[in-house]
Image: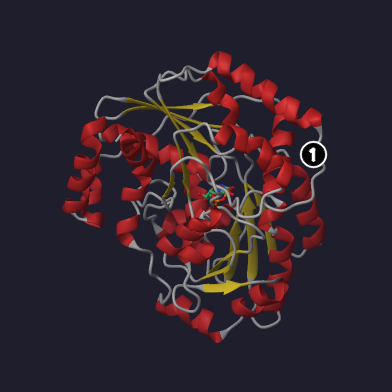
Amino acid sequence: MSDTLALARIPLDDYAELLGAGEIEELRALAKPLRGRSIEMINSTAVGGGVAEILNRLVPLAEELDLNIKWDVMTGGEDFFEVTKAFHNALHGAPYHASPRDFEIFLAYNERNRATLPLEAEFVVIHDPQPVALIDARKPGSNHWVWRCHIDLSHPHRAVWDFLDKFVSRYDGAMFSSPEFSRQLPIPQYLFYPAIDPLSEKNQELTPEFIAQVLARFRIDPQRPILTQISRFDRLKDPVGVIRAYRIVKRYFDCQLVLAGGSASDDPEGAIVLKEVLREADNDPDIRVIELPAWAPLEVNALQRASTIVIQKSLREGFGLTVSEALWKKKPVVASAVGGIPIQIIHKHTGLLAHSVEGTGNSGKTRRTWASTREGKFSHYPKAQALPDALSDARAGIVTVR
Ligand code: UDP
């Protein structure tokens, strides 16, 4: 089992100003039946990507509610993460030739982790497909198991889904981030929108001096407009498409493009995609390709806050936390209408949805988008959603036990 970061505790009452004291009280009431009862969260990486981002905040927040919660990260070799990344892409519609060897590797690492992870908590919450076969460790009638799926399963690769389904169907319940992501399953399903933590390092207010410092460190000109996409270097985030869209905007505005991303230990494709991005950037002095450390929340926060427009040109997406983060910071967002993004962006009201490079570029160059950067027009992050849903996994635990 690999280590998670030391998680920052923020007193629950600090959120009262943002959410209202009533919300905090409701959370306390909801958590009461779970007080002291044990919950174990398991995923496949401690940093990098939305699941780690959520768990980094959800776990200490649940502790604030006196839940006996812990978070363990499964371990795997390069061969395992190559297989799980291929599964991930295949579940999102990429071509994949199913090979028995891949399934064997998947099962072998799950078996190894069954031997090292405790898996004895009253509620075990397994995140995403990588650790799904840990369910084999469950003793009949012993504890409750929930599968928390963060990805879009609406059009999965048949063989990969058939393989995973055999495990998923044995859980007590499954949770999805969008009604469209779910599958027909013989177990109860719950819908919970993920959320960001407004007081975390990723989203808290920053001083102009700190933001200026970060821009200087990455040699970004504070005087000229900045288009930004923050993402792991992943083909499904289409960073090459972002560069092409930027070139359309660039014909009309003297802007810069920032493509910033770190890596995740469960994503082996980053280095290859980064090379593709650098090739496409072709030494354009106004394109900053920034390789961030996997854990750099303050830098990401500063880059988002310094942006004139935030782009999220994904080809496929889970919920898309980077969009939530940008909306929270009152940024105009131009993003693809995929995954959970249309749940967050109401086209022309809370941002702009696009369907192609041209659509992204043309949305990025409209007067409306640029005017909104001055007026703070697209700033409709649903405030009250920010914290309560961060406890969604615990809530589902309550629902399951009832
Ligand atoms: N993120 C980060 N550093 C990076 C790239 C991404 O901290 O270099 C964060 C980003 O701010 C967001 C999360 O990782 O909180 C990505 O979540 P999202 O749902 O957008 O995409 P995923 O990576 O899970 O597909």
Rendered location of residue 360, percent (x, y): 64, 73
Q: Quadrant of the C terminus?
A: top left
Three-letter code, disc 1: Ala
Rendered location of residue 289, percent (x, y): 69, 55
Q: How many marks?
A: 1
**Category of crowding for the residue at label 1, using alpha-carbon neighbours closer than 10 angstroms: few (below 14), some (14–19), many (at least 20):** some
The relative height of residue 168 versus residue 309 in the rendered view (above or below) is: above
Q: Is residue 106 visible?
A: yes
Q: Residue at x 20, y 55 (%)?
A: 20
Which colouring convention does the figure follow?
secondary structure
Q: Is residue 363 left or right of residue 16?
A: right
Rendered location of residue 396, percent (x, y): 36, 40
Q: Residue at x 47, y 53 (%)?
A: 301
Residue placed furthest toward the front: 186
The relative height of residue 95 versus residue 136 in the rendered view (above or below) is: below
Q: Is residue 213 visible?
A: no
Q: Nearer the viewer, residue 110 or 322?
A: 110
Residue placed furthest toward the top: 115
Q: Residue at x 54, y 74 (%)?
A: 352
Q: Nearer the viewer, residue 171 or 373?
A: 171
Task: Find numbered disc 1 in the image and state the secondary structure of the residue it sits on.
Answer: loop
Which residue, given by chain and number where applicable, does mark 1 sit on? Answer: 98
Q: Residue at x 69, y 50 (%)?
A: 234
